[in-house]
Amino acid sequence: MAEKIERVKTLIVGSGPAGYTAAIYASRADLKPLLYTGMEPGGQLTTTTEVDNFPGYPEGIDGPTMMVQLQQQAERFGTEVRIGMVTSAELSDEIGGIHKLTIDDSKVIEAETVIISTGASAKYLNIPSEQRLRGGGVSACAVCDGFFYKGQDVAIVGAGDTAAEEASYLANICNKVTMLVRKDYMRASKAMQHRVTSLDNIEIRYNTEVDEVLGDQVVEGLRMVNNQTGEKEDIAITGLFIAIGHKPNTDIFKGQLDMDETGYIITKGKSTKTNKPGVFASGDAQDKEYRQAVTAAGTGCMAALDAERYLATVETEKAVV
């Protein structure tokens, strides 16, 4: 049962590039934002060793350092950053209504506007050996962790554009890449398929799935199974990369916000507006197409601007009445 109640103008949920950029813009607009970090402060970038494609860093920067700097920048303008997770939400249907979000099942935040920047989490196969060896050779980000397997043999699971792109990336630094495709075809675009098939050190195994990841403390091999014949085969690898998609972290808003079939929040037109007045969505929680730090930051900016304009409209309507 929630006991404490606090009222704020703008509540930001999530602390990745989208959340912190929203905080920077919202605080500069004097919206006095309160930001809760969620379960993974800094978001997915905290697990990224090197970020080379974010503008303004000509020499690159590691993900955790970048997120610390974004937080410091948001705090410089007055954002209050707290560690905590939204565990339930009651979103108003009325223009100018108050949204109630509960933090860690114990504190209620009443917010005039809410910016959702909860991101998305990588999907895993959820087999015991895979989960046991996460961090010991099993990864969901080839671009993040591929460097550690330079010159070695690795495998990747997936059949879409992301899997093809990561397989191509790994092929440039690894000795051999075995690509496991569950069906007898790839879902990736023709261009991405051509890129994969043109690389001599990528071997594609169709109708093939992971049966078991081999190794005690670190990945030492992979037992594959042909899902048509049932035949199993062991190969020696040191890294296994899972590229089967992401799940948006939006479950607590289901039934209140419009979402697509996979849980991505639907926003209106080119804005960050949701179907609830005063509630905005940014970053990977609503973007399943690009999922880049720079695009997440862009939508975080948009969400703050949308929130500022919404509050101004509400104040104008109150003044007229």
Image (cartoon, helix red, strand yellow):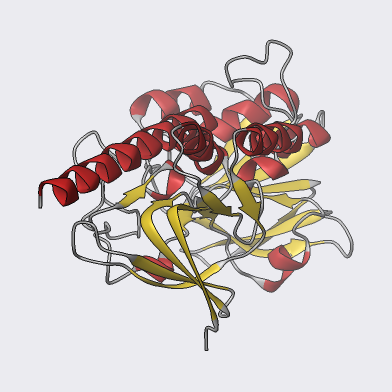
User: Residue farthest to the left?
Assistant: 321
Say which of 161 and 195 sits in front: 161
Task: Give how far across and how far down residue 53 sits, in percent.
Answer: 59, 20
The answer to which image quadrant residue 73 occupies is top right
- At 52% from the left edge and 43% from the top edge, which residue is drawn? 19
Q: Nearer the viewer, residue 196 or 277?
A: 277
Question: Is 234 located above or below residue 319 in the figure?
Answer: below
Vertical comparison of 83 with 170: above or below: below
What is the x, y in percent for residue 205?
55, 46
The answer to whether 54 is drawn above or below residue 42 in the figure is above
Residue lying at the far bottom in this picture: please name it: 1
At 63% from the left edge and 61% from the top edge, which residue is drawn?
A: 39
> Quadrant of the rendered structure where residue 214 is?
bottom right
Residue 289 seen in the figure: no
Q: Which residue is nearer to you in this view: 18 or 188?
A: 18
Residue 148 image-quadrant placement: top right
Give coordinates of residue 84: x percent, y percent.
63, 64
Q: Residue furthest right?
A: 217
Tell whether 148 sits left or right of 116.
Answer: right
The vertical placement of 226 against 280, above or below, is below
- Expressed as whole percent of the image width and height from the top left, the position of residue 13 reads 50, 55
Q: Residue at x 10, y 53 (%)?
A: 321
Using residue 90 as the reference point, say whether residue 65 is left or right of it: right
